[in-house]
Amino acid sequence: MGLKLKNVLPMFVFLLLASTAKAQSAALDVTSAKYGGKPDSDITQALEKAWTDACASTAPSKIVVPKGTFKFVGTTFKGPCKAAIEFQLQGTLQAPADGSQLPKDDTWIGFDHVDGLTLSGGGTFDGQGALSWKNNDCNKNRQCKSKHINLRFHFLTNSKILDVTSKDSKNFHVNLLKCEKVEINGFTVSAPKESMNTDGIHIGRSTGIDIIDTTIGTGDDCISIGDGTKDLTVTNVTCGPGHGIAIGSLGRYPEEEPVSGINIKKCTLTNTTNGVRIKTWPASPKDGTASDIHFEDITMVNVGNPILIDQEYCPWNECKKGAPSKIKISNVSFKNIKGTCTDPVAVKLACSPGLPCENVELSDIDLKYTGDKGPITSVCSNVKPTINRVAQPLACATGAAPAAAPAA
């Protein structure tokens, strides 16, 4: 009897481990007979069913959308879930081009309260936004109806977004709100410069976000950093077309939270309307802060407004310009920023007269103006920056003509 038990026990352990491994690696293919998804048809129900099964699983799961083009009306995938989920998009998901059938809110695809999500597969989220851009009057009508965001992440934790593409979103491509410890790596944003209000990646009230080796071309800010963002690192990002990489805008609303610990490094901006900038509204309803912000090793190629602090940011004339911004900017550095610019004012530090900027550093700035509107120069107000290895025209010259208003 003891001999038989001795022989059976190893086999039992082997079968148990094999069963566990199988459970951990099982793929929920939306085109399988269980879910019934088919190329060139709407797979909304199939994906929702697959998510329900994955979210209920106590072992890690993988949802697979195979190669091919699939219609997707949109939904928000909600947690909390019982184990980690990999959402592997190998093909293309397409939103309705005319906006019909989309969810009532402004989210095409959302992930809400999910821990341990991996979004991967090399596929494309195609918002088909061209019709929406043509009908978008939000630059003139602030009561306009918000268009749909391609990917919205709310309360996402310990997650990764890897090697997928957001294409032609009707609104922002990616919006992260109240997320923590999220890595975005090998991500691509693709939209023409005519696409209005299509920020590539917008972050707000989130902590510990890393954006790495990412390519963004769009019609608005490549990366926009909203209030409450802390400990953000952006490395090896290529930006263009677009409006550059921006902190803000800040100071428009009364309940905004401080911004701190922002590191932007080893990025290249090409043919963008702005370079790296911090923008705050005048007449802020409440005091606020933006601190410990660092831009380093940035290459500019034919960029407008390469280095900019704009505390008089007021698109569409929607503010009281006479009242100073109440956002205190401090501990900011611009280091090793080189390349070419399309505006003669290559450095503009327009800080708040009510709360002057403190501890601002300009080091190793080497920019060349490619236009014919006069010599390259700089304009600084309400700030006394520390200057290291910066040629005189860029070292906060005074008396220069005001720069043209930056693009919103």
Image (cartoon, rainbow, N blue to C red):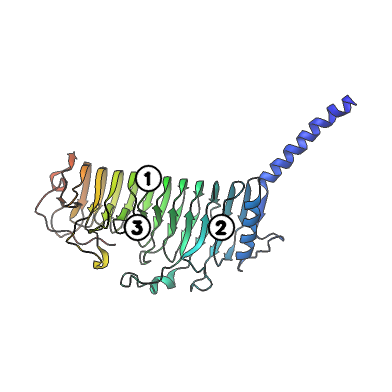
Number of callouts: 3
For disc 2, the marked residue is: 77
Tag 1: residue type? Lys
User: Image quadrant of residue 201?
Assistant: bottom left
Marks 1 and 3, the one that precedes in the sequence:
3
Q: Which of 314 and 286 lies nearest the eye of the viewer?
A: 286
Residue at 52%, 61% in the rendered image:
109
In the picture, the disc for residue 230 is: 1
Q: Which of 179 and 338 lies nearest the eye of the viewer?
A: 179
Residue 152 as seen in the image, left or right of residue 307: right
* Nearer mark to the viewer, of 1 and 3: 1
391 lies above or below 218: above
Marks 3 and 2, the one that precedes in the sequence:
2
Residue at 56%, 66% in the rendered image:
72
In the picture, the disc for residue 12 is: none
Q: Distance of mark 2 from mark 1, alpha carbons?
A: 26 Å
Residue at the limit of the structure toward the left, as seen here? 399
Q: Which of 216 and 383 lies nearest the eye of the viewer?
A: 383
For disc 3, the marked residue is: 221
Q: Picture coordinates of residue 134 (x, y %)?
A: 39, 73
User: Residue 294, can we see it?
Assistant: no
Could you tell me which secondary element the residue under label 1 belongs to?
Answer: strand
